[in-house]
Amino acid sequence: MDERKKRVLSAIINDYIANAEPVGSRTITKRYDLGVSPATVRNEMSDLTDEGYIEQPHTSAGRIPSAKGYRFYVDNLMERERLTPAQKQQIREALAGEFSEIDDYMRSCINMMSRLTKYPAFALIPASSRGRLENIQLVPLNDRQVLAVLQTSVGIVQHKVVDMSDPVDPTELMSIETAMSNALRGKELNDISVELLSRLMTELHLRERLRAQTLGLLETALQLGSGNRVFTGGVMNMLSQPEFQDISRLRGLVDLLDEENNVSELLDKGAGEGPLNVTIGGEMPVESARDCSMVVANYFINGEKAGSIGVLGPTRMSYGRTVALMEQIAHELSSSLSDKEKK
């Protein structure tokens, strides 16, 4: 694509993102200093239409970007918005606070993401599937309840209160904790199976009933076999987008985001291997999200991928602003979680 076509396409997309109205050649000529006549702009728009980068909705004289046009724009023309010092400080402060539960921390993170981007936001934490077990503590809360505290090499801390069917002897529990810590510390979490735990329980020569109870406690605490944990926030932000004023379209999107499996699939397939990925329109992995675009950023703890965060918006998304925000949030999230693990 030659430089003039790039300038015309960029102007059309920027104008449509800002105003949500089909864009005509006269509008482009008046609003953007392209240095060419309206007739030249019309010719370029005609070529861009033939090539599939823009399209004409219904009988409107204006054009709107196609999915192909948005993809070319994101890959070749988009300029990231420069975040203000105040925006960077807001992100830094929101992610720097202390927390005792990773769940609360991630909910706070997605609320901040949604507030800044004005789009629904998501976070995915691999539930006990990545990293190594760094520490395990079994704390008796009373004679029938045990608090299991697990910490992984990617900074995920899980607290689980488990009800026991029989009274718990604190001395026996301490012996189990020591034995489990010695046997499991440093093991990859996805290598810790029920069979491994059962063998360890047998080697401890525990009473059969206590052995079964302890196995159940550890299985629950480690969430063996469970899938990713997903957090969602700001879904009603879609109400502010003209594309979703149609209640039936909005309802379809809300139904999609209400299903954790759908959100997990969106984030998992949209994440890719690099730091950030933009998925547009028909590229979306879930059929009911084909009218949307998604920006997903991976976050890392001490260089190891720990999970993904993302936002979902219309294909008329403010890509430059959203990408800049998500890159900054993922950077601060990675830095904050890495610092917390070191402490």
Image (cartoon, rainbow, N blue to C red):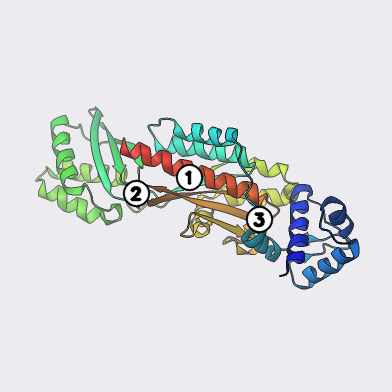
Mark 2 crowd level (few <14, some 14–19, many ≥20, 10 Å Cα)? many
What is the distance, in whole Å, between disc 2 and disc 3 at their CAs? 37 Å
In the rendered view, would you say 230 is above or below 52? above
| Residue lying farthest to the bottom in this orientation | 50
Q: Nearer the viewer, mark 2 or mark 1?
A: 1
- Among numbered discs 2 and 1, the one appearing first in the sequence: 2
Residue 331: image tag = 1
Q: Is residue 189 left or right of residue 309?
A: left
Q: Is residue 137 left or right of residue 275?
A: left
Helix or strand or loop: what does disc 2 sit on? loop
In the rendered view, would you say 311 is above or below 6? above
The amino acid on which the numbered mark 2 sits, given as a three-letter code, is Ser
Query: What residue is at 76 percent from the left and 66 percent from the top?
Result: 5
Query: What residue is at 82 percent from the left and 56 percent from the top?
Result: 22
| Residue lying farthest to the left in this orientation | 205
Mark 3 crowd level (few <14, some 14–19, many ≥20, 10 Å Cα)? some
Tally of marks: 3
Residue 128: image tag = 2
